[in-house]
Image (cartoon, rainbow, N blue to C red):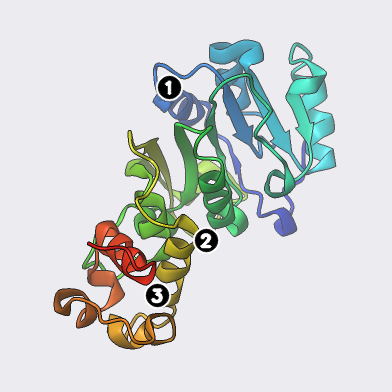
Amino acid sequence: MQVRPKKYYGQHFLKNPATARRISDSLPSDADFVLEIGPGMGILTEPLYQRFGQNLKIIEIDQEAISYLENAFVDIQDENIIKGDFLKQDISNLFPDQFHITGNFPYNISSQILFRMLEYRHKIPSLTGMFQKEVAQRIVSQPGSRVYGILSVLTQAFYQAEIVFSLSENEFSPPPKVKSAVIQLQRKEKYTLDCDEALFFRVVKTAFQQRRKTLRNSLKALLQDIELPQHISSNRPEQLEVKDFESITRLLQGLAE
């Protein structure tokens, strides 16, 4: 039995077992519980199950893939195969303790997966997963880069980010039209901010919506009569570090710097 890759799910199945094992081996050595998103035909599930056993859970939205996985992995308990959309799941009670996320993520929802992970970051110490290389580069980019943006700032506010390795399109079936990369996010020891976090997210998103403007102009609607420090107000958003966005948020809250 084969699973037909479906364009509307953004499926490009990894086909190299050595690469799948490399991803599995890249998960932190202290990982106990693991959630795999979008296992497809289970090429990554195999080494993950060998390593984590029943401490592994998989979540899949494609009914054809679910049927395949149930037949291919008869030793995985039924409750460990979650049928549904990761973006709509309450994942807070899936495991008795903190858990790590991995997967060959559908590229059409990979950014949404990241934002969802940030909501549950108190439960998720790390993520090791496959992204379109262009998206991976945005996630890990630093201030001053032309690809530094919303994904970079919001992810790096709470996680250390690095690209583990890159892959060609020939590693997948069907081959995507883009290169791919595996990234790893390791949660920072301090993963809360000294400001209103909902407002922080709003500041970052508002600033980058008009990224060609200086902060004094792109944030005008939020700032109203508040004056930003000169070293911030005259810069564009891609020149600011996470701590600068945190400072802006504190000013909007009326907190002394």
Q: Quadrant of residue 183?
A: top left
**Residue sitting at x 47%, y 26%:** 18
Query: Image point 67% across, 25% down: which residue?
Result: 57
Residue type, numbered disc 2: Lys
Residue kind at label 3, given as amino acid type: Phe
Element under disc 1: helix
Closer to the eye: label 2 or 3: 3
Q: Residue furthest left?
A: 231
Residue 158 is at least partly visible in this image? yes
Vertical side of 51 occupied by 251: above or below: below
Q: Residue 208 has which mark?
A: 3
* 125 lies left or right of 94: left
Residue that label 2 marks: 177
The local crowd at label 2, few if under 14, some if 14 to 19, many if 20 or more residues have their Cα within 10 Å, is: few
Cβ atoms at labels 2 and 3 below 8 Å apart: no
In the foreground, 65 or 216: 216
The type of residue carrying mark 1 is: Asp
> Is 70 in front, or is 176?
70
Would residue 1 be seen by someone viewing this image from the given angle?
no
**Where residue 255 sits: x, y (%)?**
32, 63
Q: Earlier in the sequence, mark 1 or mark 3?
A: 1
80 with respect to 230 (left or right): right
Disc 1: CA contacts within 10 A as few (<14), some (14-19) or many (>=20): few
Horizontal side of residue 135 vs 115, given as left or right: left
Task: Please tell me which residue is depicted at 28% across the width and 71% down the height of the picture.
Answer: 238
Cα separation between marks 1 and 2 = 27 Å
**Vertical order, 91 against 55 (above or below):** below
Q: Which quarter of the rendered picture does the C terminus lie within?
A: bottom left
Residue topped by disc 1? 25
- CA distance for labels 1 and 3: 36 Å
